[in-house]
Image (tube, rainbow, N blue to C red):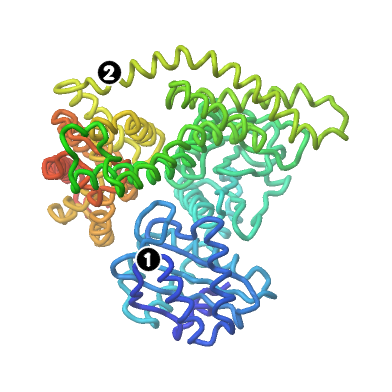
């Protein structure tokens, strides 16, 4: 599909005025209607809103792709819109959106909108191309950029196919990429694996399980001749077909960020040999495959990813209640009621408390669901709730989630011999009832030692000051910079968010403050380094430096990933030192934070905003100088 043909100049918006999601949708739909691309404004808008209700089409990295397919659409169209100031579009990464691609497909179209989504995603994974779009000044320039990008993409694919056909001596691997939404990350992982394999001299075939279905499906012949298999997926894919093959099973994000590592492991012969269950062609790639570590990580991240919105939303609402009381005033004799003394503060506190109350049940519930699918959800929720009421806290809920999941797995095996006519009743009666009783009983016992451990840990953390707090802050700050959004980074972040619930009465968490400071340093350091050491960066990297300023201020550590991936040995050490320094200074000074996210935009929720920002600046400057001194000049590096 040629995206340029769908990008109609008459319905482009080169300066989107909206600042909220609803207003942005209204403005774009109005443009579609005025351009004669839709016949019924309200019907098409409702289609857009219905899709947004499923999950936000704000993909992150400043890009959104709202789309609808209904009778109101006259002709398949992609509306391009650009915002200079950014729109709060409820993106998956929580950051502002600057580029919009509103896709309209007529009801009778043959999956036109899904094909457009896939084609757009393949082009939008290129940061250089995205940077060029942000600079575009006219509709003609946008069309020209897409035309050139599509031609270049086709040329690259043809060259890859020709090279593979003419060189049968290359080692060959197969891969599958998939993400829950099936939009951007599926195709980003595909492109990263293909590009890296080509650079390594390895032939590869990648199957995508995306929004437009399964494309480039692997055949039995492909799998048979493959030297290894890579599954970079966060959703169900067909697994039994890989029986007997060395298989690397990782999250889709590893396919994007660690393609060389995955390819090397797949070819090494050291990857685990996969053994299929032999029962279902579309088995889950969850608890049955991959290394123990990767399975545990995937299950844990499923719980954490669902928990974080409750932590962030609830935490900020509670933090605002404290701030309102501070502004409105609370008598010295009523300081124990800070956050709920004034009526308005009490409203925010109740709202935030309601969201916070779901934190542990959601964590445990979705860990269990990742292990045992839907039957694990109710049992996991109950385990998390029991951990909450029993005082076992975050650690108890985490254990409860895994316990619930594996109890359901055990029950599935126990009841596997029942007649097929009872399959329906197993799911709605046997699994929830027996799972609840077994897991609930176990949690009542587990809560006793876990409460002691949890109380002791909380007392220890709340009692940290001076050198001890500085050392812990430095450790967590450094962890945020080691893998920039990977498992180590997430471990530090989850530890920080878990500490907020127990530190509200003290005015916030020193741990969370140290974690956020450490996470803000890498992208800010890149911005500073591109300004000072101009000969160490390409022009495209210098352009991306300004983007990293915004990401750093917003606490989006991942903005520094392209720089770290391009030169890890020279860049990452500088990141770690600067982040550890910032985290250590924050911890040593005992600065507290009431919010689990937000960067400079939640500065008022810090106990000492000016000192906090100073420490981040110091860490970023130190990091920038280390990175700049270690990196080679561009010409020399080339």
Residue in the picture at 52% in, 25% down: 386
**Which residue was labeled with disc 1?**
20
Q: Is residue 158 visible?
A: yes
State which tag comes first along the sequence, 2 or 1. 1
| Whether residue 262 is situated above or below residue 184 in the rendered picture | above
**Which residue was labeled with disc 2?**
460
Can you give x and y, in whole percent of width and height, for residue 49 in the image? 53, 66
Image quadrant in which the N terminus is located? bottom right
| Whether residue 366 is situated above or below residue 408 in the rendered picture | below
Drawn side of residue 602 relative to residue 301, left or right: left
| Contact? badges 2 and 1 (CB < 8 Å) | no
Can you give x and y, in whole percent of width and height, for residue 9 in the image? 44, 84
C-alpha gap between disc 2 and disc 1: 43 Å
Can you give x and y, in whole percent of width and height, for residue 138 in the image? 35, 81
Residue in the picture at 68% in, 43% down: 238
Can you give x and y, in whole percent of width and height, for residue 66 in the image? 50, 66
Secondary element at image label 1: loop
Q: Residues within 10 Å of mark 2 (few under 14, many from 20)?
A: few
Secondary element at image label 2: helix
In this view of the protein, which residue sits in the foreground, 468 or 168? 468
Drawn side of residue 166 relative to residue 629, left or right: right
């Amino acid at each position: 599909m040629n995206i340029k043909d769908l990008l109609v100049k008459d319905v482009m918006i080169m300066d989107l005025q909206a600042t909220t999601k609803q207003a942005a949708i209204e403005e774009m739909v109005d443009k579609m209607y005025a351009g004669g691309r839709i016949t019924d404004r309200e019907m098409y808008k409702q289609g857009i809103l219905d899709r947004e209700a499923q999950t936000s089409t704000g993909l992150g990295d400043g890009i959104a792709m709202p789309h609808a397919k209904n009778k109101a659409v006259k002709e398949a169209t992609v509306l391009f819109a650009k915002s200079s100031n950014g729109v709060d579009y409820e993106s998956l990464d929580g950051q502002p959106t600057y580029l919009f691609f509103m896709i309209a497909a007529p009801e009778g179209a043959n999956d036109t909108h899904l094909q457009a989504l896939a084609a757009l995603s393949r082009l939008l994974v290129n940061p250089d191309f995205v940077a060029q779009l942000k600079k575009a000044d006219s509709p003609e320039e946008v069309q020209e950029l897409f035309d050139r990008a599509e031609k270049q993409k086709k040329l690259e694919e043809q060259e890859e196919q020709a090279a593979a056909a003419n060189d049968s001596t290359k080692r060959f691997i197969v891969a599958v990429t998939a993400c829950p939404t099936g939009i951007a990350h599926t195709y980003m992982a595909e492109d990263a694996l293909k590009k890296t394999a080509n650079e390594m001299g390895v032939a590869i075939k990648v199957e995508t399980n995306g929004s437009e279905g399964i494309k480039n499906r692997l055949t039995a012949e492909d799998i048979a001749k493959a030297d290894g298999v890579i599954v970079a997926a966060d959703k169900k894919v067909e697994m039994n077909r890989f029986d007997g093959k060395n298989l690397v099973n990782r999250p889709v994000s590893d396919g994007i960020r660690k393609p060389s590592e995955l390819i090397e492991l797949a070819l090494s012969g050291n990857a685990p040999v996969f053994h299929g269950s032999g029962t279902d062609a579309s088995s889950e790639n969850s608890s049955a495959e991959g290394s123990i570590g990767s399975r545990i990580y995937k299950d844990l991240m499923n719980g954490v990813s669902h928990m974080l919105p409750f932590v962030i939303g609830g935490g900020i609402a509670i933090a605002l209640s404290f701030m309102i009381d501070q502004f409105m005033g609370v008598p010295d004799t009523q300081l124990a009621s800070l956050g709920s003394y004034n009526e308005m503060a009490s409203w925010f506190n109740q709202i935030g408390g309601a969201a916070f109350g779901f934190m542990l049940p959601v964590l445990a519930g979705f860990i269990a669901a990742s292990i045992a699918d839907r039957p694990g959800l109710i049992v996991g929720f109950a385990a998390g709730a029991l951990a909450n009421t029993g005082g076992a806290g975050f650690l108890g809920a985490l254990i409860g989630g895994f316990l619930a999941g594996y109890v359901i797995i055990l029950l599935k095996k126990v009841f596997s011999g029942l007649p097929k006519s009872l399959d329906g009743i197993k799911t709605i009666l046997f699994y929830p009832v027996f799972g609840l009783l077994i897991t609930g009983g176990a949690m009542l016992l587990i809560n006793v030692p876990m409460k002691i451990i949890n109380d002791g840990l909380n007392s220890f953390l709340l009692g940290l000051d001076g050198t001890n707090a500085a050392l812990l802050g430095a450790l967590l700050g450094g962890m945020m910079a080691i893998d920039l959004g990977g498992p180590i980074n997430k471990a530090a972040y989850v530890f920080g968010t878990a500490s907020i619930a127990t530190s509200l009465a003290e005015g916030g968490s020193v741990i969370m403050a140290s974690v956020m400071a450490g996470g803000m340093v890498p992208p800010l350091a890149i911005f500073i380094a591109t300004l000072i050491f101009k000969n160490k960066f390409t022009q495209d990297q210098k352009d991306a430096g300004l983007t990293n300023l915004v990401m750093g201020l917003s606490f989006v550590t991942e903005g520094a990933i392209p720089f770290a991936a391009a030169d890890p040995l020279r860049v990452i050490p500088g990141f770690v030192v600067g982040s550890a320094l910032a985290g250590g200074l924050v911890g040593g000074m005992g600065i507290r934070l009431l919010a689990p996210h937000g960067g400079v935009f939640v500065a008022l929720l810090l106990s000492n905003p000016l000192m906090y920002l100073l420490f981040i600046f110091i860490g970023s400057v130190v990091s920038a100088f280390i990175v700049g001194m270690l990196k080679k000049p561009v010409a020399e590096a080339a």
